[in-house]
Image (cartoon, rainbow, N blue to C red):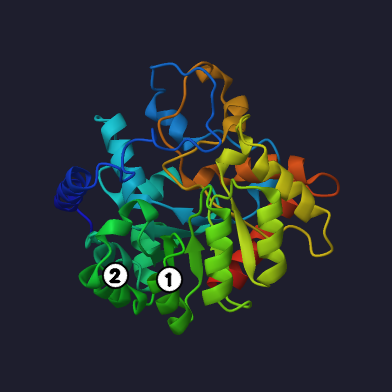
Amino acid sequence: MLTRNYVIRTSQLLRASIQSHPHVRFTTTAHRTMGKNNKKKSNIIPAETYLRLPPLADPSLADQPIIDTHTHLVSTFSTYRSKYRNGTLYTIHDFVREMYRDRNVRAIVDVWCEAPVLMAWKELADSALTAEDREQKWGGIDYWFVMGVHPHDAKSYNDAVEASILEAMAHPRCVGWGEMAVFIRQLNHAVRLGKPLTIHTREAEADTERILMEHVPADHKIHIHCFTDSPEFAQRLLQHFSNLYIGITGVITYSTNLNTSNIVSQMAMSDGGPRILLETDAPFMVPSNLYNSIPEIKGSRLPLCHTAMIPWVAEYTAGKAGHPWNGTDIMKRANENAKTVYGIQ
C-alpha cells in the first residue's frame, strides 16, 4: 500500500531529480512553450473542489470510457501537493480514486521518462498487478505504464539507466518504450522487444523522419506524443507507418497552436478517419475549453491537468474534425486506437 511514507519518499526522489536535472518536468510548466496558451492568468489558484470538474454537458460523452494514453502520474500528484498544501488527498492512490470517481476512467498509461530512473515506478506498477489490487487501490482503473528517457535527459542515458528500463520492460503492466526522442539505441531495443514507441519530437522533423524510417519497421506501433509540428510532417509519417498514431492533448485548444487542429481536420477527411490517441500529458496543458464549464472561476487557471479532462479534449477535437464527427465518436475512435497501439481497452 502507498502510504504517507511513500509520499515522503517520492517527494525526496523528486527533489533529488530536480536538483540533478533542473529541466525535468515535475511541478512547473514553464518550459512548455509549444502551443502556449497566452491568455492572461490570475495568480489566484481555484479551490481544490474545482479539480473534481463539473458534469459534462453532453451525456453521451460522459458515457464513453476514458483512456488517457499519456499522463505523468507522479508529477501530477506532486503538483497537486505543492499547489494544495492543505489538500485532502495524501497518496497517489487517493488522488486517482477520488479525482476520477464517477468520471468513467477506464485506463491510464503512466509515463516514466527520467534519468536516472525513479525507482518508485515498481511500487506503483506492482500495486496494479491483480484485479483485486486495481479495484481496491485504483478504484477499478487499469494502470499501465511506459518507460524511456526524455530528450531533456539524453545526456544522462547510460548502461545503468538502460538496464533499469529493460527491467521495467518485463513488468506485466508495461506496454511500451517512451517517452523518448528518436535515439537509435532506445529505438533498437524497443523494436527488438516488440514494444510500442512513445515518441517526443519538437521542431526536429527532418531528423525524426529520417531516423524513424531507417531504424523502425513500417508496421511498428508508434505514438507521436502531443503532436504540434507541421501537418505535412504528420502526413508523411502516417503514410509510411501503418500503425502510427497522433497524440492529441489539451494543447489543441490553445490559440497559438494551429498545427494540431489542421492535422486533425486532414485526418478526418481521409478514408480511414483520424488516427489519433487522446492524452493529457498531465499535469501539463489544461484544455482551455474546460473553463467554459466552470465560469465561476473566470480569470483564474487550474494549476494542473488530469485524466478526467480528456472529454473536453475530445469535444474540441471533434469541432476541428468537423461533420459528421462529434465528441463521442472521437472518444470511441481514440479508444479503439489505444487498443491497437497499446493493447488496452
| Disc number placed over residue 270 in the picture, else none | none
Q: Residue at x 30, y 66 (%)?
A: 127
For marks 2 and 1, the one nearer the N-term is 2
Type of amino acid under label 2: Asp
**Residue pointed to by mark 2:** 126
Side (left or right) of 113 relative to 293 = left
Side (left or right) of 55 relative to 86 = right
Task: Please state which of residues 49 and 292 is positioned toward the viewer in this rendering.
Answer: 292
Identify the element where label 1 is drawn: helix
Task: Please state which of residues 158 and 114 is positioned toward the viewer in this rendering.
Answer: 158
Residue 307 pos. (x, y %): 49, 48
Identify the element where label 2 is drawn: helix
Picture quarter with the C terminus: bottom right
**Residue pointed to by mark 1:** 184
Q: Is residue 169 above or below residue 200?
A: below
Quarter of image, res 173: bottom left
Q: Residue at x 38, y 29 (%)?
A: 48
Q: Residue furthest bottom?
A: 192
Q: Is residue 114 visible?
A: no
Side (left or right) of 49 relative to 261 = left
State how far apart marks 2 and 1 are (Cα).
29 Å
Q: Is residue 170 above or below residue 329?
A: below
Q: Residue at x 40, y 64 (%)?
A: 145
Looking at the image, is mark 2 or mark 1 nearer the viewer? 1
Picture quarter with the N terminus: bottom left
Type of amino acid under label 1: Ile
Residue 83 pos. (x, y %): 31, 30
Q: Is residue 100 visible?
A: yes
